[in-house]
Amino acid sequence: MKKSVRIWIASLVLAPCLLVGMWVATYGDYYDPKNIHYVLWKWGIASIDPGRALGIMTHDSNSQRLVVGRTEYELQRKFGYLRSVSEAPPYLRDCYLSSDWKGKTVKFLRDGPYMVVFENGKATDLVLMKPC
């Protein structure tokens, strides 16, 4: 094999490794929305703890796209479980009862501060319930 071909093949292998290494070094914070684990989770390529994902979502300017348009079943697969208003912690329940969404079909993502509004079986809005 020619030397130039070996160099080309080596660069095809090393360039992505270098890129990923730089990405991890640059966005290494555990709760950074640009952290490689979170980004891969958003793309459906890797899994992370759903509680951690919710913590990161509060810093993600595009977290709506993770929820809006999905069914309750799809959200359960992504986040593990959803809570009804009656199962939600008292603080979130009170926020819901004093909000404009009162009377709508809603679920809370796990024990986190996110409320999902549903219409016709699909999520139409993601609401960060703090502060309420």
Image (cartoon, rainbow, N blue to C red):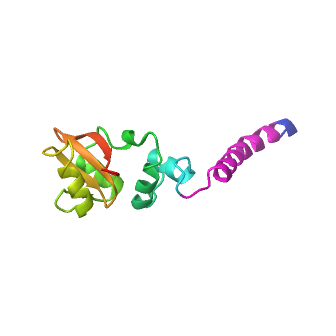
Q: Is residue 116 left or right of residue 37?
A: left
Is 17 part of what is drawn in magenta?
yes
Q: Quadrant of the N terminus?
A: top right
Q: Is residue 109 left or right of residue 94?
A: right
Q: Residue at left 16%, top 60%? A: 86
Query: Which residue is most to the left?
Result: 103
- Foreground residue among 71 and 60: 60
Magenta stretch holds residue 129: no
Q: Which residues are magenta?
A: 5-30
Residue 118 picture location, percent across and down: 21, 42
Against 82, residue 118 (above or below) is: above
Q: Main secondary structure of the magenta part?
A: helix
Q: Is 47 on the left-hand or right-hand side of 13?
A: left
Q: In x, y percent, where is residue 105?
A: 16, 46
Q: Residue at x 47, y 48 (%)?
A: 59
In percent of width and height, residue 19 lies at 68, 44
Residue 83 appears anywhere in the view: no
Q: 5 left or right of 61?
A: right
Q: Residue at x 45, y 46 (%)?
A: 42
Place residue 4 in its image quadrant: top right
Front residue of 102 and 41: 102
Q: Residue 15, percent across and down?
A: 72, 43
